[in-house]
Amino acid sequence: MSQTPIIGEISWERMIRAVEKVKERLQRAAQVLEAVGIPYAVVGGNAVAAWVSRVDEAAVRNTRDVDILLRREDLSRAVIAMEQAGFLYRHAASMDMFLDGPQASARDAVHVLFANEKVREEYVTRTPDVDEVDATGLFRVVTLEALVGMKLTSFRRKDQMHILDLIEIGLVDEQWPARYPELLRDRLQDLIDHPEG
C-alpha cells in the first residue's frame, strides 16, 4: 500500500502550522509594542489580509511576511522590548528586523519599515506615519488609503495582486485613483481598467 496519504497528511499539518506561526509572530510583536506604548502599524500582506477579512474571509491570502511600521526614533525602545520577548534585532542587507529566536532566518522575522521615509530612494512617496492606523482589530493596521499607497509605490507583482484583491471585493473602486499622485494614480487606474493584466 502506498504511503502517499501519510506524506500528504504531514505536509498538510506543516502548511497549517506555517500559517499559524506567521499569525502568532504578528500577534506577539503587536502585544509587545502595545505593552510598552510604542506606536506602530502593521503593513504589507497582513494589513491587506486584515482589511480583506472585514469584507470576505474567503478572499484572504496567506503571507509569510510580518511587516511593521515604526518611527525611527522608537527603534531603540522597540529593540529592548522585543528582545525581552525573545526576538533578536538584526540589521542586514539594509533591512531592520526582529528574528523570531536565535535559530530563525530572515523569513522568520518581523521586518521593520520606518515611518515617513522612502523605503527606496527611487520611490515617489514616503511611508505613512504610524498614526495613520485603524485600531479596531487585534492589532493596529495602517489605514486602507495609506496601505494602497504603499502597495502602489512598491508595485511588485505581489503588491499588484493585493490591490486587485481589494478591488475585487469592492474596498477600492473608481473613486480611488484621484487620491494619489500621478504615477500612483495611473498605476491604480490601470489595475482597475485591466484586472486580468
Image (cartoon, rainbow, N blue to C red):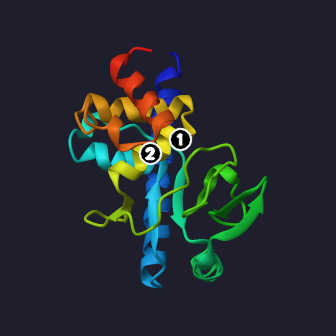
Question: In the image, residue 31 lies at what x, y percent?
Answer: 43, 74
Query: Which residue in the protein does label 2 denote?
Result: 149
Question: In the image, residue 88 lies at what x, y percent?
Answer: 68, 70
Check the image and name the residue furthest to the front.
182
What is the CA distance from the residue labelled 1 to the residue labelled 2?
Answer: 6 Å
Identify which residue, 95 or 108, lies in the foreground.
95
Regarding mark 1 in the picture, which secondary structure is present there?
helix
- Note whether residue 19 is visible: no
Residue 97 versus residue 44 in the image, above or below: below
Residue 153, labelled with which disc? 1
- Name the residue at 43% across, 40% down: 62
Instruction: Specify the amino acid type for callout 1.
Output: Thr
- Name the residue at 25% across, 40% down: 57
Question: In the image, residue 64 lies at what x, y percent?
Answer: 53, 45
- Cβ atoms at labels 1 and 2 below 8 Å apart: yes
Regarding mark 2 in the picture, which secondary structure is present there?
helix
Identify which residue, 117 or 70, lies in the foreground.
117
Question: In the image, residue 121 lies at what x, y percent?
Answer: 70, 48
Check the image and name the residue furthest to the right.
93
Give neighbour class at mark 2: few <14, some 14-19, many 20+ (Cα, 10 Å). many
Judged left or right of residue 68, residue 91 is right
Instruction: Specify the amino acid type for callout 2.
Output: Gly
Judged left or right of residue 157, residue 133 is left
Q: Quadrant of residue 126?
A: bottom right
